[in-house]
Image (tube, rainbow, N blue to C red):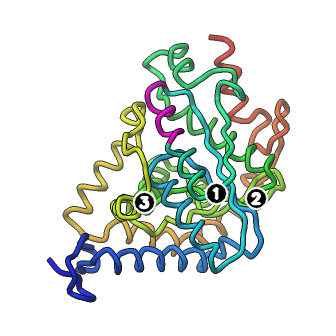
Amino acid sequence: MFCSSCKSPAIIYLPYSKTHLCEKHFKEMFDKRIRATIREFAMIKRNERIAVGLSGGKDSCVLLYSLARLRETLPFEIIAITIDEGIEGYRNKTLEFAKAECKKLGIEHHTFSYKKEVGLSLDEIMKKKGEEEIPCSYCGVMRRRLLNNAARELNADKLALGHNLDDIAQTVLMNIMRNEPQRLARLNEPLVEDEKFVPRIRPLMRTPEKEVAVYALTSGIEIDFQECPYARHAFRAHVREQLNETEEKYTGTKFKIVNSFFAMEKALRKGLAEDGEKLEMKYCKQCKEPSANEICVFCGMIEKLQTV
């Protein structure tokens, strides 16, 4: 097949637009979409300090690479933060990729670990709790807390995450299935602002996962495509499988889900804002971090782990 733009050999087919693209025009399209997403949501301003959550996987490495290139036209600072959950045989490998990419791009890199910040690695937590517990329920809460605290400690204005279109579509469906309108409403921005929350941005949220992988391979970005060994236990894995099957039959489904979310986001946030009690911000009695309850979910998990 040949590129729909220049008739050079194509490297990818985009079914949602029915176009074939060569490497040159694919990368141009990819970069243009990221810049457009950043502009649409005013994600990055001049001279801001942006912390990138860098796992060493394809999404976060491509995000770091893309933002580093964006600095050629928009002056801002980048630092990278890696959270080491302590997953033997997995995180130690991706950590090396993260370090290498930062060194290549000349970006300041910081690593924070569950072991140091929480007292236990994820592997140790799972040994304590047993197979009946879902690892992602612990990991998600702890990783979000450590990322926010690290970004705040490093004086970042924003925290950039590598969530792609597939991730966002999955999250929208998961929140609907779980009947969690508040989580859905704050997906793009917090319902209540607090100086302890570092605002999050997702420049890849309109970019399909497959295209992120192709961009990484064609740009010489060294990454590990290995999936987290605990991922198979997650509800997300089931949703991802079903969504991929639907996308295969009905092209453009993922784009439509995400676009529908953006269309209804304002109405959802307005509806929740009318219920002032639900949006009241408290502070955890133990860690003093913002929380919807007297004891935050993070501290509640730590308490349970200490009693096992």
Is residue 91 in the magenta section? yes
Residue designated by label 3: 169
Mark on residue 66?
A: none
Q: Residues within 10 Å of mark 2 (few under 14, many from 20)?
A: few
Residue 192 rendering spot, x and y as whole percentages? 76, 58
State the separation of the CA atoms marked 1 and 2.
35 Å
Q: Secondary structure at mark 3?
A: helix
Nearest the eye: 47 or 133:
47
Residue type at mark 1?
Answer: Gly
Residue designated by label 2: 192
Q: Residues within 10 Å of mark 3 (few under 14, many from 20)?
A: many
Earlier-in-chain disc, 3 versus 1 = 1
What residue lies at 28% left-to-right and 80% top-to-bottom? 17
Q: Secondary structure at mark 1?
A: loop
Residue designated by label 1: 106
State the separation of the CA atoms marked 2 and 3.
23 Å
Residue 248 rendering spot, x and y as whole percentages? 21, 62
In the image, taking residue 125 as reference, residue 302 lies left or right, namely right
Is residue 3 in the magenta section? no
What residue lies at 82% left-to-right and 33% top-to-bottom? 287
Q: Is residue 190 visible?
A: no
